[in-house]
Image (cartoon, grey):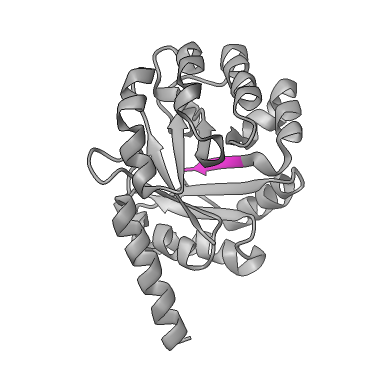
Amino acid sequence: MTRIVVSLAGRDVDEIVDVLPKALDVADIVEIRLDHLERMEDMSSIEDYLDCRRTMFTFRSGSEGGAGGELGMRELDVLEGLVEACPNSLIDVEMEKIRGIPRARRLAEELGGRLIASKHVAKPRLEDLVSEYRWAEELGGYVKIVCNAERIEDNVVPLELYAMFGPSKLISFCTGKAGILSRVLSAALGAPLAYASQPYGEPVASGQLPAPSMRALIDAVREALKVNP
């Protein structure tokens, strides 16, 4: 079953706490984007508001389209603290950091099935992404591969990955308005997670649809495929 993830971003913890109840009304999981926070260290004050089984923590580096700098020791301190404080949560760690930072590699290995090993690429080559998937799959969690879509044809690459590897661990789609198609089809094909925005407010990532609209489109495509396989 595909779970809908609503992404939340704020300059401080209070902004996230304010929108958290409404996000949980429409989401299966809320993603808290740590890279948008001015003080990540304040995350310890939000723990009482969270249902860890329905929470994901993400620090997206600037080099992969995030709002912060690069993942360093301070950010890893916060992530490790959240792993301990919220033991059933999902944690997104970028593949490049898992490869390049021994401490991030250890964290990824400890997470096992709670890990989302992610990669964001502007101009993807299918053969490169195949190699990335095979490497990340060995870590034991989900594999998230996101491409930027400038043209509608760019949506083909994530769909080719599903044709090769299936949807059990793979989360792959395109960002941007041209990538909305692959966001919906990824979930309709059975991806474990689909990212969406709050019903009100700006999306955190380009191409995110409001969660109710995303859920309705996924259901409609799945029903159509039953009738016209």
Rendered residue at 73%/40% (across/down): 112
Residue 18 percent across, percent down from the top left:
30, 27
Does residue 222 belong to the magenta stretch?
Answer: no
The residue that appears at 50% across and 23% down in the rendered structure is 47
Most extreme residue toward the left is 200
Q: Is residue 132 above or below residue 78?
A: below
- Per the rendered image, the range of residues in magenta is 117-122
Front residue of 82 and 171:
82
Count of marks placed on residues: 0
Which quadrant holds residue 68? top left
- Image position of 66 (left or right of 78): left
**Residue 89 left/right relative to 175:** right
Q: Quadrant of residue 126?
A: bottom right
Q: Position of residue 36 (x, y in %)?
A: 39, 23
Seen at 52% across and 36% down, the residue is 56
Pick the front one: 10 or 143: 10
Q: Which SS type dominates the magenta stretch?
A: strand
Image vertical order of residue 89 relative to residue 142, above or below: above
| Quarter of the N terminus within the rendering | bottom right
Q: Position of residue 111 (x, y in %)?
A: 71, 35
Left or right: 228, with 138 as reference point: left
